[in-house]
Image: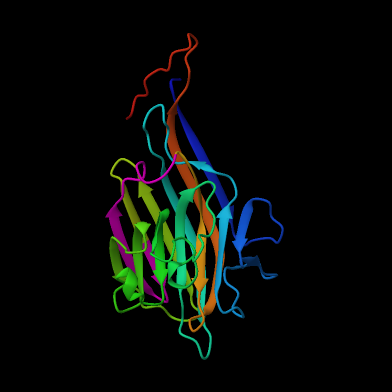
Amino acid sequence: SASETETVSFNFNSFAQGNPAINLQGDATVLSDGNVQLTNVKSSYSAGRVLYGTPVRLWDKATGNVASFVTSFSFQLTDLQGYNAADGIIFFVAPEDTQIPSGGVGGTLGVASSNGVGQFVGVEFDSYSNSEFKDPPYQHVGIDVNTLVSSKTVEWKRVSGSVVKVTVIYDSPSKTLSVAVINSGDINTIADVVDLKPKLPEKVKFGFSSASSVGGRQIHLIRSWSFISTLKTTSISSNGTIMDIATA
């Protein structure tokens, strides 16, 4: 048929050391218990990321169609005595060659330069208020589009050491990114309209990033992650012309 759907799906109930399906960057390590620890709690400045190793096609040049995706993950932030609980975790989408930017420690969460700007779209789980990024004066969940100055935030009553469960949905027809966060019996939701196509290249990587600094550290663990995306594309017909896709 003329229209085809490209689907990417994966599921990590836990993470295995040496698993080629994931890329670790910076200080991120897979622990023996199957969790990914993103930052080094013994280091003054630390940044670490875990990415799904295979690039995902976010949009299709031929049709202009953009993928929809649903992802669920769980993580754990645990305070360390004598330190501010900092800085948090961000689930993010970025170009496929994405690396930790220089200066990407502390409040930049490992995705932005020290001015807070970078090529990424993400959902931040921010345990430390950075006034330079116009953070609200409390722990929060935020939607970030190419900057750590969030377009939307909601207060997040974080409990140290508790397992936080999150579902993020991107609905391509309405360009809506919506987030549900379940945290020690509390549910927080947040949503915003985000047009991904002008912000990101056709092929991207998905992952998690975290950073910390001298006086602000905590244990940042990613425990599980599942993901599915669908993208409607065209196929070449027998006479070599691209057939139009019927969008239902």
Q: Quadrant of residue 231?
A: top left
Q: Position of residue 218 (x, y in %)?
A: 52, 79
Q: Quadrant of residue 174?
A: top left
Relative vertical location of residue 93 with respect to residue 65 in this rendering, above or below: below
Q: Position of residue 185 (x, y in %)?
A: 39, 75
Residue numbers of the magenta segment: 180-201
Query: Residue 62 or 9: which is nearer the viewer?
Result: 62
Q: Quadrant of residue 181?
A: bottom left
Image point (53%, 60%), residue name: 100
Q: Is residue 199 magenta?
A: yes
Relative vertical location of residue 48 with respect to residue 172 in this rendering, above or below: below
**129 relative to 215 in the view: left or right:** left
Relative vertical location of residue 129 with respect to residue 9 in this rendering, above or below: below
Image point (42%, 76%), residue name: 184
**203 relative to 28 in the view: left or right:** left
Image point (43%, 80%), residue name: 159
Q: Is residue 99 magenta?
A: no
Query: How many numbered marks does the figure carry?
Result: 0
Q: Position of residue 3 (x, y in %)?
A: 43, 25
